[in-house]
């Protein structure tokens, strides 16, 4: 998914320590015109920019696409990151400039590693009446952010762990390991618990973790978390306790070793400096918009009926750290 804000903020991200459970509330972000869908964004924000290498989290739906118009994101660029598409309901058609053409379906990971540069489109299919899911980004470490782009699909097997059903789409948890490529130690999993049930999950104490609540109102490490909130815990825990309370729980558990690198994120680009972001935007406007050059920096999306998405104007100041 693209960040479709017309005046995207500049975020210089750096992991920061925290004690206890930190609750991050979402903000609503419209993705276009009056019938376009909106999302609830919990990363990045001023309180926290990174959880491991996770640097962006949009949560959307359930939306009736007959009313909201569904998802229609034209070809747009990415650099220095990997996109993680995860659905609870619906279907999205993905096309990118590596030649990948795939359908994103519930319970199936679609992982697109942008590396030095890629462009892609995402459109909900005609078969969809309801769209519900999450789009997440991973910042690539400096050693791999200029790698060639590629696309992967992985379908995790549901694993029963106590009362919980766990689908591990990145990393490892409760004996289940994803084969999808990661460049830093990471975790991504869907967690389902019936009402009144609880689970103690063994986790890597080197990781910081976040629990995004999609349905239910659980207690996470003893703290109440509302639907739509992202609850954060710092490294140091070898187990995480999740209680479903009086409603069934569905949540995404993300985590990873603190990235240990500062990143500048603007629009759909992740870089390390203002000058890099300026260069990426200029290349997109030249290769992706003006020339539509298949041999250009971002390649070309084949089979999409429509125009690519121009980049917003850069702010009139150098992109720098917040706060």
Image: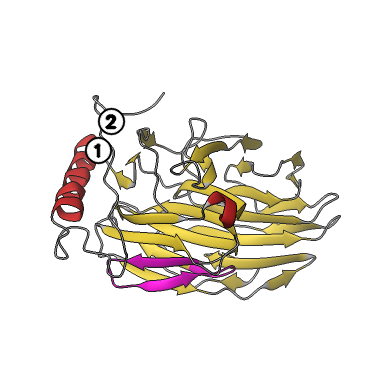
Q: Which residue is mark 2?
A: 319
Does residue 139 appear to the left or right of 54 in the view shown? left
Q: Quadrant of residue 308?
A: bottom left
Q: Residues in magenta?
A: 92-109
Q: Nearer the viewer, residue 86 or 48?
A: 86
Q: Residue at x 35, y 55 (%)?
A: 74
Q: CA distance from mark 1 to mark 2?
A: 8 Å
Quadrant placement of the N terminus: bottom left
> Residue 319, how many percent across, how many down?
28, 30
Q: Is residue 96 part of the magenta span, yes or no?
A: yes
What is the basis of the colouring in this image? secondary structure
* Residue 165 seen in this snapshot: yes
Which numbered tag is attached to residue 273?
1
> Is residue 188 in the magenta section?
no
> Residue 297 falls in which quadrant of the image?
bottom left
Point 31% across, 52% down: residue: 80
Secondary structure found at label 2: loop
Along the line of sight, the residue nearer the viewer: 101 or 207: 101
| One can see residue 114 in this view | no
Circle 1 sits in a helix, a strand or a loop, which is it?
loop
**Count of numbered circles in the view:** 2
Query: Which is nearer the eye, 216 or 1?
Result: 1
Give me the disc on residue 285.
none
């Amino acid at each position: 998914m693209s960040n479709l804000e017309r005046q995207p903020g500049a975020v210089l991200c750096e992991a920061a320590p925290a004690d206890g459970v930190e609750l991050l509330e979402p903000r609503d972000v419209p993705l276009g015109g009056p019938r376009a869908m909106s999302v609830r964004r919990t990363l990045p924000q001023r309180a926290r920019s990174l959880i491991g290498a996770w640097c962006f989290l949009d949560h959307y739906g359930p939306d009736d696409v007959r009313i909201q118009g569904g998802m229609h994101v034209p070809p747009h660029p990415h650099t220095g990151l990997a996109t993680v598409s995860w659905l609870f309901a619906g279907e999205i058609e993905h096309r990118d400039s590596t030649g990948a053409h795939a359908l994103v379906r519930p319970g199936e990971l679609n992982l697109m590693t942008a590396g030095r540069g890629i462009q892609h489109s995402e459109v909900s299919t005609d078969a969809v009446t309801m769209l519900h899911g999450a789009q997440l980004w991973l910042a690539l470490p400096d050693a791999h952010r200029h790698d060639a782009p590629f696309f992967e699909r992985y379908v995790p097997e549901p694993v029963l762990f106590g009362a919980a059903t766990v689908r591990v789409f990145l990393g490892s948890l409760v004996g289940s390991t994803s084969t999808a490529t990661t460049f830093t130690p990471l975790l991504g999993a869907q967690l389902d618990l019936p009402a009144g049930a609880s689970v103690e999950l063994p986790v890597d104490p080197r990781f910081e973790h976040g629990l995004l609540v999609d349905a239910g109102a659980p207690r996470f490490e003893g703290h109440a978390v509302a639907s739509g909130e992202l609850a954060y815990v710092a490294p140091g825990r070898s187990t995480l306790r999740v209680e479903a309370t009086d409603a069934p729980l569905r949540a995404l558990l993300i985590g990873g070793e603190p990235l240990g690198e500062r990143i500048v994120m603007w629009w759909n680009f992740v870089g390390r400096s203002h000058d890099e972001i300026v260069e990426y935007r200029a290349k997109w406007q030249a290769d992706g918009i003006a020339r539509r050059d298949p041999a250009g920096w971002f390649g070309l999306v084949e089979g999409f009926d429509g125009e690519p998405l121009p980049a917003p104007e850069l702010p009139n100041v150098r992109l720098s750290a917040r706060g």
